[in-house]
Image (tube, coloured by chain):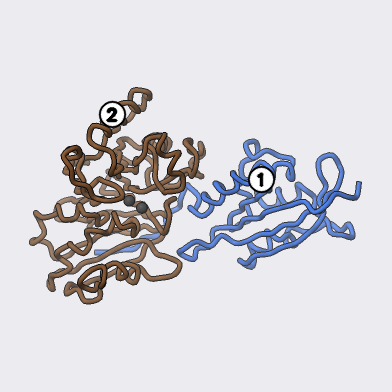
């Protein structure tokens, strides 16, 4: 399984000299194995997905939730406008409006020139709750997690290997500690013994305390959750747009120096490829 | 190809239950959280005084155990069955319930308490359990 990080920035895209290394595109990840491919989230990073576009006719985009940073690139996903393409969009169910109607609110005038209803591709929209299904040869588990509005995380299993993707997550609202008991951990079933966890780490501890309830983790939250779940490798994701490369490096080094986690932890970087 | 598989058995509680505990942890009123079978998954610190137990010591408790711990009885002194308690009614009917009754505390005195319970039904319309909030009306019947 190949995991290609096409966008790693949280909240909104950025473009400046100080943030070139970790990148400025918002969340999008390509997961592939042989001929099979799925796309996780449709942030602006989706426009980096240029290579194999013309070869494939069936596309699957799995959305964790509908916050703008995770769908901003959806309207620029070219297969939507190819009448020979089949595009499947998967995302969390809501108690009220359908997923299609919620997406249509953004992908329709006046916010977008075209309506999602009128795209020429063969479009299928699928609603997800807590589920397990197979798609493109991958076994996929979804679970609602703690974040404002309907939000799911994904666990993707390919043979013996597994990855979990929880880009926006506040596992314990208002606390720097997480519950010790696995039963009470948001996201636990997704991360349990996974080979790779890609997880929200938007804030420093100090900043988290000023952003309680906004739905994001501190680096410590991410590391403690990974440790509690037995994740074998943690990639810190959804970088705060105000954090330059230098600030990210300094926050990360400060955190790592004060702790002794037994699994590798690193910062997600746009363009990073991970082989599992 | 898309194939839906059998439902997986999860280790962690549903997110609605987890978030209910986070709320209960931050309240000053006693709160119980039960699953669909009536198992008491969590009770907060104020609720420890009603049960005379500590959550760290007991962990989750089956309905037959927790519903008799505080010996509920009505105004005429008749013992209440578990199915007469608001929280158990909510579990059966999947709708809110309210009631007042008496309980005996550990020191032998009796207190009248009120209970409001409501079902936990998440966005996907899945029934995950129920929450009960307690408060003491008055003290009497030594
Ligand atoms: Zn986000
Ligand atoms: Zn979000």
- Tell me the subunit letter for badge 1: B
Neighbour class for label 1 at 10 Å: few (<14), some, many (≥20)?
few
Give coordinates of residue A49: x percent, y percent.
14, 54
Q: Position of residue B127 (x, y in %)?
A: 54, 62
What residue is disc 1 on? B28
Q: Residue at x 40, y 70 (%)?
A: A97
Chain drawn in brown: A
Q: Which chain letter matches label 2?
A: A
Instruction: Name the foreground residue: A167 vs A180.
Output: A167
Residues A66 and A55: in front is: A66
Query: Where the C terminus of chain A falls, by quadrant?
Result: top left
**Extreme residue toward the right, this view:** B142
Q: Colour of chain B?
A: blue
Position of residue B36 measured from the top left corner of the image (x, y, whole percent): 59, 58
* Element marked by disc 2: helix
Q: Position of residue B95 (x, y in %)?
A: 62, 67
């Amino acid at each position: 399984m190949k995991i290609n990080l096409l966008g790693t920035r949280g909240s909104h895209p950025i473009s400046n000299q100080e943030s070139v290394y970790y990148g400025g595109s918002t969340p999008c990840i390509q997961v592939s194995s042989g001929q099979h491919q799925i796309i996780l989230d449709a942030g602006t990073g989706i426009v980096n997905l240029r290579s194999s576009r013309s070869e494939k006719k069936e596309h699957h985009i799995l959305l964790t939730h509908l916050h703008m940073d995770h769908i901003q690139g959806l309207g620029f996903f070219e297969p939507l406008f190819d009448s020979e393409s089949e595009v499947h969009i998967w995302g969390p169910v809501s108690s009220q409006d359908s997923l299609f109607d919620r997406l249509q609110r953004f992908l329709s005038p006046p916010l977008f020139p075209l309506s999602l209803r009128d795209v020429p591709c063969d479009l299928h929209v699928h609603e997800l709750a807590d589920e397990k299904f197979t798609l493109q040869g991958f076994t996929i588990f979804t679970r609602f997690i703690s974040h404002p509005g309907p939000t799911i995380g994904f666990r993707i299993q390919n043979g013996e290997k597994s990855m979990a993707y929880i880009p926006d997550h506040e596992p314990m609202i208002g606390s720097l500690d997480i519950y010790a008991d696995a039963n009470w951990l948001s996201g636990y079933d997704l991360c349990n013994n996974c080979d790779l966890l890609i997880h929200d780490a938007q804030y420093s501890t100090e900043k988290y305390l000023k952003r309680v309830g906004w739905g994001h983790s501190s680096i410590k939250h991410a590391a403690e959750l990974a440790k509690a779940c037995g994740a074998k490798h943690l990639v810190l994701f959804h970088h705060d747009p105000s954090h330059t490369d230098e600030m990210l490096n300094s926050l990360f080094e400060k955190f790592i120096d004060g702790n002794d986690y037994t699994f590798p932890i690193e910062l997600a970087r746009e363009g990073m490829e991970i082989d599992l | 190809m898309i194939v839906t598989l059998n439902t997986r058995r999860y280790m962690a509680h549903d997110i609605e239950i987890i978030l209910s505990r986070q709320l209960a942890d931050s309240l000053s009123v006693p709160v119980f959280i039960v699953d669909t079978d009536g198992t008491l998954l969590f009770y907060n610190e104020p609720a420890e005084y009603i049960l005379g137990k500590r959550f760290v010591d007991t962990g989750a408790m089956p309905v037959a155990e927790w519903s008799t711990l505080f010996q509920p009885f009505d105004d005429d002194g008749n013992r209440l069955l578990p199915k007469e308690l608001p929280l158990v009614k909510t579990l059966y009917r999947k709708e809110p319930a309210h009631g007042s009754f008496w309980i005996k505390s550990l020191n032998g005195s009796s207190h009248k308490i009120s209970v409001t319970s409501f079902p936990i039904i998440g966005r996907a319309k899945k029934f995950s359990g129920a929450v009960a909030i307690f408060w003491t009306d008055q003290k009497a019947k030594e």
